Amino acid sequence: MPNFSSSKRFAQAIHAIAKEKGTVDTWIKNLESINDSLSDKDLVSVLNSPGKPIALKCSILDKIYGKSLDQLALNLLYLLSNRNSINLIGNIKSDFEEMVDLDNGIQKVVVTTATSLGSEQIEEIKNILENISGKKTNISIEIDETIIGGFKAIMGDKLIDASLSNSVNQMRKKLKF
């Protein structure tokens, strides 16, 4: 049976509950702890297995997390395991943290450049992106030599392509008859 679960929907639900109950920090710790412990591929395999009884999966989860997580976090794990989607926890964690950062006025940005940048260049790009987004930015840098020069930035669902390869491609399109 195909799995159509969306980590973003789970993260949104957790985010709404955490904000309402004032437990955002607790959820961050819980998701981090769960994500770390689910690095064991054998455990994930058992919890995602459609052939394993739900009672067995819940029992395993209770033994691992019963004393360290509150009931809502445990219920999330029961649901994910029941749907054979426990492997979504890493994406749920990332999506949740991004929502919390946005609440705090911080935008995560992935910047791709052709070469490594100095601190002054990173600061200049950061200022440009903060002016565009209106938020403080948390930048991670990736290198891709195929963009030739300039940079690409991904902010949420927005792409800012100020790369030389994009400029060349745009010029090519304009020159074609």
Image: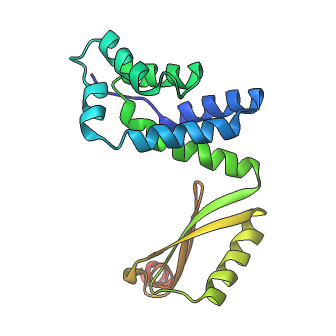
Where 139 falls versus 78 (above or below)?
Answer: below
Quarter location, residue 111: bottom right
How many numbered marks does the figure carry? 0
Judge by depth and name the residue closer to the eye, 69 or 104: 69
Q: In percent of the image, x 49 and y 85: which residue is there?
A: 164
Location of residue 35 in the rendering, given as x and y in whole percent from the top left corner:
44, 41
Query: Can you say which quadrant of the picture contains the N terminus?
Result: top left
Location of residue 105 in the rendering, given as x and y in whole percent from the top left corner:
76, 55
Residue furthest left as drawn: 51
Q: Is residue 101 left or right of residue 153?
A: right
Where 76 falls versus 7 (above or below)?
Answer: above
Q: In percent of the image, x 58 and y 89: which residue is there?
A: 118
Q: In percent of the image, x 78 and y 63: which residue is there?
A: 134
Q: Is residue 161 left or right of residue 165?
A: right
Quarter location, residue 48: top left
Judge by depth and name the residue closer to the eye, 124 or 104: 104
Location of residue 74 in the rendering, given as x and y in whole percent from the top left corner:
51, 22
Colour mapping used in the image: rainbow
Quarter location, residue 39: top left
Where 24 falls versus 50 (above or below)?
Answer: below
Query: Can you say which quadrant of the picture contains the C terminus?
Result: bottom left
Location of residue 141 in the rendering, given as x and y in whole percent from the top left corner:
51, 74
